[in-house]
Amino acid sequence: MTELFQIRKKHIRDILKTPHTAALITNEVNIGYFCGFFHSEGYLLVTAENTYLLVDFRYIEAAKRQANDCEVICFQKLSEELMSLLVKNTVQSVHIEQNSLTVARFLFFRDKFREKQIEVISDDQLDIAIGKSRVIKDDSEIKKIQTAQEIAEKAYLEMLNDVKIGVSERILAARLQYLIKRYGAEDISFDLITITGKKTSMPHGVPADDVIREGDFFTCDFGAVYEGYHSDTTRTVAVGSATDEMCKIYDIVLQAQRKALTVVRAGVAASSVDEAARDVITQAGFGAYFGHATGHGVGLNIHEAPTVSSRSREILQSGMIITDEPGIYLPDCFGVRIEDMLLVTDTGYQNFVSLPKELNIL
């Protein structure tokens, strides 16, 4: 386990140009990624030779049990302990995360470091280094994401038994959240989307007291968190019956989703995956009703690199995990989205999702 975290931190140390440069990580997810301890009150200091996790008294016992490849320090006053470590390691400049700090927090660190003539490097070098490390999942991360997906699917299939005429969206969301946690997840990946009828035309519709009616589509976008790692899946089903138009739109989305799958592999531009799905929907005459990206990365965050969109400049690499989730959303009528979660490989992909995709009429 220690070796794993040493490998991850190499990406950080690659930007430390001299023995007198360090990196300060304050984002809780990134801290967890580099040492195994996930909590908002931690600070991770990485020098050329040492790594320190600073926490307050409330979390010291948990940090000592969970943190790997670092010295755990209980601070009374963060600034004093941090300055002491910087001086001890003869640090003259510190990289900070550009995308994670508030302006107030940045000014705090800048002013404190200036007292010891320590330079703050606030460009994007540290963020880029962290991104390069996190975007490629190792075997341990892949296993956790697979477990999260298995939990989510088990819960979803059981919840489907409750998808009946007269049942409210809110009840189904609560039921699914309960089942996800019951089967071993520490949390849900995001606020669950369990919407029905005309609300399915809203990609991120919010469950309310609306009830399922005969002939409705029911869209469920769901995921579980297991040891910090997320899963993400969407399925759209019909309840009781489906009109010819509903079947037509569903089939177009399914074709688009499957077309994108044929493109996914290492070395392919992420934008090409988006293009493959979007072309199917556009050629069918519904391009104006597919307004979001075809997919995104998944890992410690539910949305992370790479972005699978027409504007993406990223090239897919083996070990990336992405979603494939095209949709068509007809305002004040209905919508359809089908989403799988994929591990990119040299020859194609591994699909984490085992749920059927053909239209299911409950």
Image: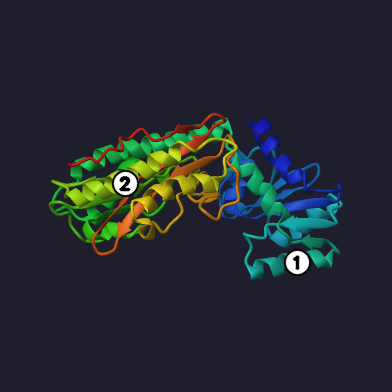
Image quadrant occupied by the N terminus: top right
What residue is rendered at 73% in x and 40% in y? 10
Residue located at (65% from left, 45% from top): 132
The numbered dot on residue 98 is none
Q: Identify the amino acid type marked 2.
A: Ile
Between 316 and 169, the one lying in front of the other is 316
27 sits left or right of 116 in the view: left
Identity of the residue drawn at 78% across and 51% down? 22
**Mark in front: 2 vs 1:** 2
Label 1 environment density (alpha carbons within 10 Å; few <14, some 14–19, many ≥20): some
Q: What residue is at 25 percent from the left and 41 percent from the top? A: 359
Residue pointed to by mark 1: 110
Left or right of 275? Residue 151 is left
Amino acid residing under circle 1? Arg
Identify residue for label 2: 252
Q: Is residue 73 visible?
A: no
